[in-house]
Image (cartoon, rainbow, N blue to C red):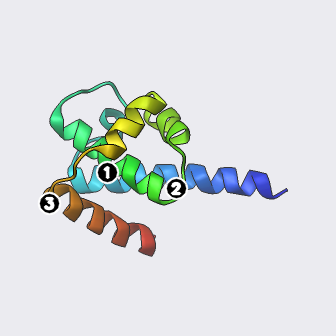
Amino acid sequence: GNKKSSAMNKNALISQVLAITSHLTGIPVERITGNHRDAESTDARYIAATLLHQHGLYPSQIASCLHRSPRSIRWLLARATTSMLRSYLAQARTLLSTA
């Protein structure tokens, strides 16, 4: 039925968002979904989480694909953004809409 295709779409969206985030930031997907706590990995994670959230995923769903706790995702989404991150997000949105 319809549920399966929406799960497929969700997985496609997740891998697309991770690929675009990695492409823009130069941070490998393994680092975005890994345990790295350096600023660059955290910024990339913020971009991925924000894009997924804007596409309708819940913090708990984002948490499972980024291997984080829902609480840490909520914290990440609430972070103040910088002009650099806003610029990455704008570029990522453009790439996602054309994908």
Q: Residue lying at the far top in this picture: please name it.
A: 35
Residue under numbered circle 2? 13
Mark 3 burial class by Cα count in 10 Å: few <14, some 14-19, many 20+:
few
Q: Identify which amino acid the numbered label 1 is placed on.
A: Ile
Residue under numbered circle 1? 47
Q: Quadrant of residue 69?
A: top left
Q: Identify which amino acid the numbered label 3 is placed on.
A: Ser
Q: x, y (%) of residue 87?
A: 20, 64
Mark 1–mark 2 CB contact (< 8 Å):
no
Residue under numbered circle 3? 83
Give the residue drawn at x 28%, y 68%: 90
Nearer the camera: disc 3 or disc 2: 3
Mark 1 burial class by Cα count in 10 Å: few <14, some 14-19, many 20+:
many
Give the residue drawn at x 32%, y 52%: 21
Q: In the rendered view, would you say 20 is above or below 97?
A: above
Count of numbered marks = 3
How far apart in space, not on screen, are marks 1 and 2 (Cα)? Answer: 14 Å
- Give the structural element (helix, strand or loop) at label 3: helix
Q: Quadrant of residue 27?
A: top left
Q: Identify which amino acid the numbered label 2 is placed on.
A: Leu
- Give the structural element (helix, strand or loop) at label 1: helix
